[in-house]
Amino acid sequence: MALAAPDSSKDSDLSSLPTIAAIATPLGRGGVGIIRLSGARAYDIACELTGKSAFKPRMASFCRFYQADGTVIDEGLVLYFKGPHSFTGEDVIELQGHGGMILQNQLLARAFELGAKQANAGEFSYRAFDNDKLDLVQAEAIADAIDATSAAAASSAIRSLSGEFSQKINQLLEQLIHLRLHVEAAIDFPDEEDVDFLSDGVIQDKLEQTQEKIQHVLATAKQGQLLRDGIHVVLAGRPNAGKSSLLNRLAGQERAIVTEVAGTTRDTLHETVVLNGLTLHLTDTAGLRDTEDTVERIGIERARTAITQADILLLVYDVTRDLEEESTPLQLAEQLFGELPEAKRLLIIANKSDLLSGLSNDGSSEKMTSASQLEINKRDYQQVNVSCETGAGIDNLVETLCAKVGFHPPENSLIARTRHLDALRRTAEHLAEAHEQLTVFKAGELVAESLRQAQQSLAEITGEFSADDLLGKIFGSFCIGK
């Protein structure tokens, strides 16, 4: 019989939870494979697996792992982290054996025989959150660090994991709580001179300072969301306009087949690249035209679906042939897409511009100052002149894309998600309502209510206030071993 962990004492709510186990390293051939266990029985299971009677916390012990009949499954290291001084706040065991699907699955199956159950996706991180070892922002940052597509995104995720983003949010929460205390005091004690917030301007100044800080954090979060998610860019246009050539240029390799035959691209082709720190999820599409070819028509239908889902739509056209004598790029866009996309979503790419005049490396061209170019500028659209053959103008295109989506992350940017932005925007709206009630209507009770709603929205970010279904959705996106 395995001995209990030394000086083990668990709260009843922790001991009632099942002990969970999962493979914490990617399946496949490797030098090391790790099985992680967390829960009240993790220590006992490790003792029974190894035949050892005790493990010292935070000390590696070399052991053999045994089947019920005494045969050896594998050998390796056992690490014991005694709760609450562990990732989850519970007793945690790590079994470090050899990598390989067979050995890891055999070891995991043995842990199940001894009383552990399969961990759900994100369950280790959820227990860490539930035991106040992490807040919700830090828990999400674990998944964001694992899924990072660039060095900048990984670095930002680690900063969020270390608590920088949470600290900013908690500082704002403290300011909101302080504001609410003053307002509530003014409502409860209206005759006190030192709490006459409707006339002394103190609360108004503090409220405006909080609004400024919220806007600053919101701007930082927008950059963090772009770092985490990137943007979906769809290349569209007529056949043989140079869409596939542009995709190859941006990807830095021959990802798409390029020929002189119109209609070569029959389906959507996806590629993810990181340029200037911004992740671009590129989609090359079939050329838009009327055709009787059944396969090509299916490709065009898929192209139109991708176009509606794009964050940024690149209209690629061949300057030597795609525009009729009196047509403009904007008229071409309206013709191809059925309606003219908004300027914030559309970027016009004039390909083969070098064939009309000498196109410099920055994409400038003397002959691109025509009436159509003036129309583009006047209506707040943008055109970038490129040559997919020589590469001229490609750097300018990447810079224009970054500027179009407002991507200019500072070195200390923090990773953020859409739900963070939503919560910050709602917080800013409630603060604006509080400011209006204070300065226009002098309505103390309504100021207090708006501040309460602002605090509630902001607290959703760190998980101080969060619905159970939101938590399930967040942690359900994690790896099984996390």
Image (spheres, grey):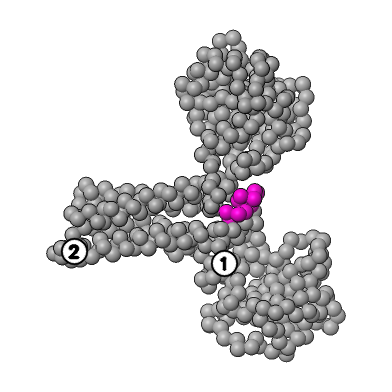
- Residue 97 in the image: x percent, y percent? 79, 71
Residue at x 60% of width, y 42% of height = 278
- In this view, the residue in front, 307 or 198, is 198
Type of the residue with mark 2: Asp
Residue 147 falls left or right of residue 442: right
Q: Is residue 96 magenta?
A: no
The quadrant holding residue 474 is bottom right
Residue at x 75% of width, y 86% of height = 52
Residue at x 39% of width, y 61% of height = 173
Q: Is residue 299 visible?
A: no
Q: Is residue 155 magenta?
A: yes
Whether tag 1 and tag 2 are in contact, CB under 8 A, the answer is: no
- Residue 298 in the image: x percent, y percent? 69, 31
Q: Which mark is residue 126?
A: 1
The quadrant holding residue 247 is top right
Which segment did they paint magenta? 148-157
Residue 83 falls left or right of residue 3: left
Q: Which residue is mark 2?
A: 194
- Quadrant position of the N terminus in the picture: bottom right
Residue 443 falls left or right of residue 313: left
